[in-house]
Image: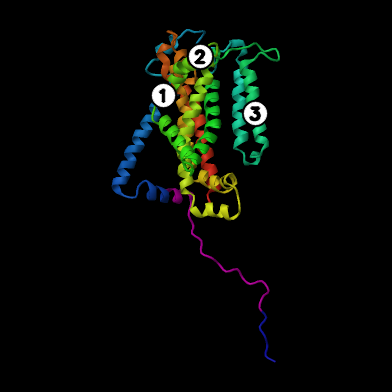
Amino acid sequence: MSSVAHLPQDPLPIGRPRVQRTLGGAIVAWLRANLFPSIPSGIVTLLLLFLLGKACFSLWQWGIANAVWSVPGSDTGACRSVRGLGACWAVVPEKYRFILFGTYPFDEQWRPALAVLIFVALFIVSSRRSFWRKELFLVWAAALIAIGVLMWGGLFGMSFVSQDRWGGLPVTLILATFGLAFGFPLGVLVALGRRSKLPAIRSLCVLYVELIRGVPLISLLFMSSVMFPLFMPDGVNIDKLLRAQIAFILYAGAYLAEVVRGGLQAVPRGQYEAGDALGLSYWQKHALIVLPQAIRHVIPPLVNTFLAFFKDTSLVLIIGIFDLLTTAKTAIVDPAWQSFSVEVYLFVGVIYFVFSFAMSRYSRSLEAQRTPT
């Protein structure tokens, strides 16, 4: 018998070449590839970095280093002494309650503040996929009832506050939330109606979309505030905020209908045929097969419409409703603080940015989750 060489039971590990790259080397490689791939690109990069650094340094000096953060009482002498060199952020703690809540009774402003918190909590809950159940409608109904009770009062020992006293951030959130909550399903129905085989329904939907999209939002608000009451019977008066809300719903529904219709056109014809082959009804086929795919295709334009609509709520100024931007403008009517409007507008801009950025980031995460790998 030939002897068999005994091999070790555990073979020696086979060495693999490793690319040794330090953190500094990785950073240098990234800079060369992205910022300095050539001499002209490097010159442009250096120029832009210089301008950006200079702008940031000037902004830091104005907004932080030389800024005035508080003043004794309403004395604006310290702010006026650094005018042009530093910001006067003292106007924000002095006027923030009027900016956020308008002319709502001062002692009762905890109620609109709590309503804003309920809105934010409702948005957070609605954004979680684990809460996308039928019970979510009950949560929305309970939250909206609670917001109405807080804003109006008249129950549980709270004094009644008419809508004429509402203003600021709660009004902006009410207009935007109700406008989108009712405008989106209206837009879906209109988009389906424009693709209907019934000429009467298709013509009515086309007429509605073209009529609403053919006039500016200011015209709709003006008609809802001035013209609409002329057609109401004597003694019947609909609140101004409700009329503005209806105008926003109709406006949002028309624009969202075109976005959804674009998504419906992007769904392959075979998906419709698959629904018919399964024996699904018209509404089952669209609810279970077509609409989920159509909405997935148009998430970016949908969010773009949502953001534009959220910011368009500032147009209610034309009919005398005090939204967030209007209360900010009114807050600096005070002669003592009239020279510091930039700081107030920056404060309001941060609020708009927070809500808009949150919607944008959520849409990106939702699109990433729905994108097939």
Foreground mark, 2 or 1, reads 2
Numbered label attached to residue 142: none
Place of residue 134 in the rendered image (x, y in percent of width and height, measured from the top left): 66, 38
From the image, tell me which residue sits under label 1. Answer: 61
- Give the residues in magenta: 7-27
Name the residue tied to disc 3. Answer: 141
Q: Earlier in the sequence, mark 2 or mark 1?
A: 1
Instruction: State whether residue 262 is above or below residue 232.
Output: below
Identify residue type, mark 3: Ala
How many neighbours does mark 2 have within 10 angstroms: few (below 14), some (14-19), or many (20 or more)?
A: some
Sequence-first disc among 3 and 1: 1
Residue at the disc numbered 2:
95
Whether residue 67 can be seen here: no
Relative vertical location of residue 322 with respect to residue 278 in this rendering, above or below: above
Amino acid type shown at disc 1: Gln
Q: Please, what secondary structure does the residue beneath circle 2 have?
A: helix
Q: Is residue 31 left or right of residue 286?
A: left
| Front residue of this view, candidates 363 and 1 | 363
Residue 25 position in % (x across, y down)? 44, 51
Question: Outermost residue toward the bottom?
Answer: 1
Report the front residue among 292 and 323.
292
Cα separation, mark 2 vs mark 1, equals: 24 Å
Residue 135 position, x and y percent, is 68, 36
Tell me the crowding category of disc 1: few under 14, some 14 to 19, or many 20 or more residues within 10 angstroms, Cα based: some
Taking 46 as reference, is 3 left or right? right
